[in-house]
Image (tube, grey):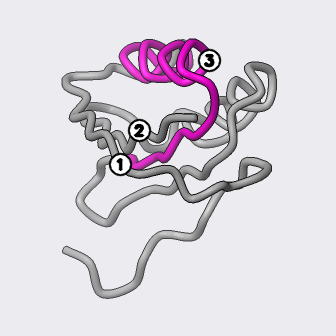
Amino acid sequence: MVRKRVIVSGVVQGVFFRDTCRAAAIENGVAGWVRNLPDGNVEAVFEGDDDPVERMVRWAWHGPPAATVRDVDVRAEPPEGLSGFEVLPTPRGWV
């Protein structure tokens, strides 16, 4: 079990990034969440077996067809035992 947190920058909001990410994660059997950040980036956490999580990290480098990904910052974290994959609301007060 592994966990990766990614911050995706570029044109990644308003292009169905979160919904497409959720669908890809479910298809790959990966748990976690995704949300827009107030600075225009997207943050996601992927948890599961190594290969499916790595597929999701690679997916984040291109995202859905309308996205233009400039960079993906990837950080390994201790797994929390998440189940399911959800779209979270944008955190309030973040700039």
Which mark is in front, 1 or 2?
1
Mark identifier at residue 77: 1
User: Between 5 and 69, which is closer to the camera in this rendering?
Assistant: 5
Q: Which SS class for mark 3? A: helix
Q: Position of residue 38 (x, y in %)?
A: 31, 66
Mark identifier at residue 52: 3
Q: Are marks 1 and 2 in contact (CB under 8 Å)?
A: yes
User: Marks 1/3: CA distance?
Assistant: 16 Å
Write down the quadrant of residue 18 in the picture.
Answer: top right
* Callout 1 amino acid: Glu
Q: Left or right: where does residue 46 sit relative to residue 13?
A: right
Q: Position of residue 42 (x, y in %)?
A: 39, 47
Magenta span includes 94: no
Q: Which SS class for mark 2? A: strand
* Callout 2 amino acid: Lys
Q: Write down the residue under mark 2.
A: 4
User: Between 83 and 37, which is closer to the camera in this rendering?
Assistant: 83
Q: Which SS class for mark 1? A: strand
Q: Position of residue 76 (x, y in %)?
A: 31, 40
- Residue visible at 47% across and 70% down? 90
Residue at the extreme bottom: 93
* Callout 3 amino acid: Pro
Q: Left or right: where does residue 28 sit relative to residue 36?
A: right
Mark identifier at residue 86: none
The magenta-colored residue range is 42-64
